[in-house]
Amino acid sequence: MPSLLGEEIVARINELAAISETPEHLARIYLTPEHRKAADLLLSWMREAGMSAHLDAIGNVCGRYEGEAPDLPCLMLGSHYDTVRDAGKWDGPLGLITAISCVADLNRRGRRLPFAIEVTGFADEEGVRFASTLLGSRAVAGTFDESVLNAHDHAGISMREAMIAFGLNPDHIGAAARARRELLAYVELHIEQGPVLEEKELPVGVVTAIAGATRLAAKLTGMAGHAGTVPMGLRRDALTGAAESITAIEEFCKTDGGGLVGTVGYIDALPGATNVIPGKVSFTIDIRAPTDMHRKRAVADIVRRIEAIAKRRTLALQVDVTHENRTVPCAPWLKEQVAEAVAGEGFPVFELPSGAGHDGMAMIDIADVAMLFVRCRAGISHHPDEHVELADADAGARVLLRLIENFWPREMVQS
Ligand code: GLV
Ligand code: MN
Ligand code: MN
């Protein structure tokens, strides 16, 4: 029987989803006016839940619920509030809103714990705008790469300019960094974004590890020319070179057989006219595999294949790594507590890896990490049809609340 937590969470998921670049397609991209509006709403929910709350130096929303005494180290919960384009409404907000609802529940009961609870809404996990991902959590972990400030979005606006327009000072990003001693652990609840829990008929699952990822930006340069006059054999068409490269990436990943996945999700051809041979093409490549070794080998092989295609077609090739994250294992001591909370709520304990990236990949640099997955319909994510049943949102919340209330810091577990 769902508790009121699930109802509050679903209502808030819908309220937040209404804050979007356009009403038809959910898009809440980092440092846009709608991103700011969402931040303000989240801050108000945090305050209503009994937390002190503020926007940090990179735009993360940060809430803190004090423990039995002031200034205790915290159990940090969180997820992100940016989205991809034409997104689903659960990816990110489910974990964030659930964490706020759990704190609100503790607050209503006047329950204080021997540690503080912090809820962080990370400002940019998806990396849609500035090619580099995990910007919010990297700032918190103190690993933000300042060179990203000079990256430009597709409209030519730099991250530095966008931060200033948003009301943030790009020279103060360092102030968002937290110290390891301030955190007891980082725990994130998230929709599974895959079909496994549904297939197993389970509402929740315990994550074993977050798979690593490499993102590349490829640029092919040929020669633009007249579509009517340059014979086919004399062309240096950058777009057909990209098309062949993209097919080669698909073929390579398809025949791997070991869980390798590769995606070209963005392509731009210039000058971009029907009657002009494309002279310059940029495209992105996202590669993930079950192990870091496997992914690294695959990236090297894929780059070699594209190099060969470019050489045969006399195209210049530039490939830059825009993002690289190793596989992050969830800490056994913490995973055990997630499993106990799952069992405590009467659900079978089932473990699964995360193929998707999450803020824990950055948080691992300052804290042990664990994740709880909630079933989503048909494994659909990064798509408007993404859906979580109210009963499952509620189950996730009850497990998270139980985890919080029974949480033991690592030192106490080991002593
Ligand atoms: C984030 O959603 C990712 O895995 O790309
Ligand atoms: Mn996502
Ligand atoms: Mn996500």
Image (cartoon, grey):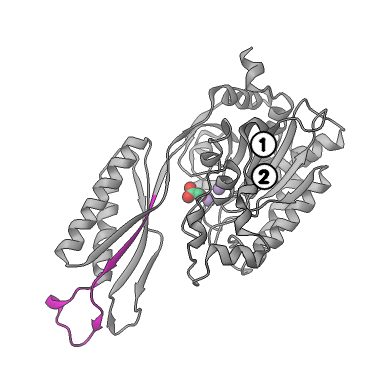
Q: Are marks 1 and 2 in contact (CB under 8 Å)?
A: yes
Tell me: residue 307, above or below residue 259: below
Tell me: residue 53, above or below residue 223: above
- Asked if one can make out residue 281 in the rendered structure from this viewpoint, the answer is yes
Name the quarter where the C terminus is drawn: top right
- The residue pinned by badge 1 equals 76
Look at the image and give the residue range highlighted in magenta: 215-237
In which quarter of the view is residue 311 placed?
A: bottom left
Question: Which residue is nearer to you in this view: 190 or 323?
Answer: 323
Residue at 69%, 25% in the rendered image: 407
In which quarter of the view is residue 295 placed?
A: top left
User: On the rendered structure, is 158 left or right of 89?
Assistant: left
In which quarter of the view is residue 344 placed?
A: top right
Tell me: residue 87, above or below residue 387: below
Q: What element carries label 2?
A: strand
Q: Position of residue 219 (x, y in %)?
A: 31, 64
Q: Position of residue 389 (x, y in %)?
A: 64, 45
**Is 230 part of what is drawn in magenta?**
yes
Question: Which residue is nearer to you in this view: 177 or 196?
Answer: 177
- Asked if one can make out residue 380 in the rendered structure from this viewpoint, the answer is no
Amino acid type of disc 1? Met
Q: Where is residue 241 in the image (x, y as percent from the top left)?
A: 24, 66
How many callouts does the rendering have?
2
